[in-house]
Amino acid sequence: MTTPGTWLSYGRAQAGLSLREVRDVVGVSHVFIRELERDEKRPSREVLGKLCRVYKLDRATVFGMYRDAEIERARKRWAP
């Protein structure tokens, strides 16, 4: 299963942008962007929207991936 972070990393690679270039456009640290790509952090809706615009990714798809990841984490947490 493709994770949201993997999708963001792919989007950045397809856009041909470095972490620092994205930092300058989106307004968050390059470290935070790297953490998003590793699925270590979750972006705000505002930041995710900016990333989708910069990477030309479909917002609904990426937002849905985060929603699905949350549901899966909840299932694992509450599974017997």
Image (spheres, rainbow, N blue to C red):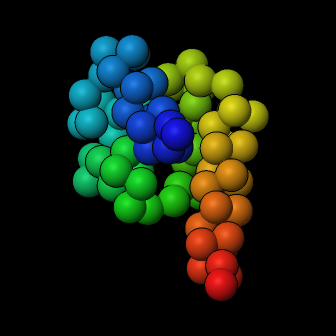
Nearer the observer, 34 or 66:
66
* 60 left or right, relative to 4: right
Image quarter (top left, top right, bottom left or bottom right) of the C terminus: bottom right
Q: Residue at x 61, y 55 (%)?
A: 69
Residue 40 appears at what percent x and percent y? Answer: 38, 61
Number of numbered discs:
0
Residue 41 visible, this angle: yes
* 8 left or right, relative to 44: left
Nearer the observer, 52 or 77:
77
Residue 73 appears at what percent x and percent y? Answer: 59, 67
Vertical comparison of 39 with 18: above or below:
below
* 80 left or right, relative to 27: right
Vertical comparison of 13 with 76: above or below:
above
Residue 24 visible, this angle: no
Residue 12 appears at what percent x and percent y? Answer: 38, 26
Nearer the observer, 15 or 23:
15
Q: Residue at x 58, y 44 (%)?
A: 48
Q: Residue at x 70, y 54 (%)?
A: 67
Residue 72 appears at what percent x and percent y? Answer: 64, 61
Q: Residue at x 60, y 72 (%)?
A: 76
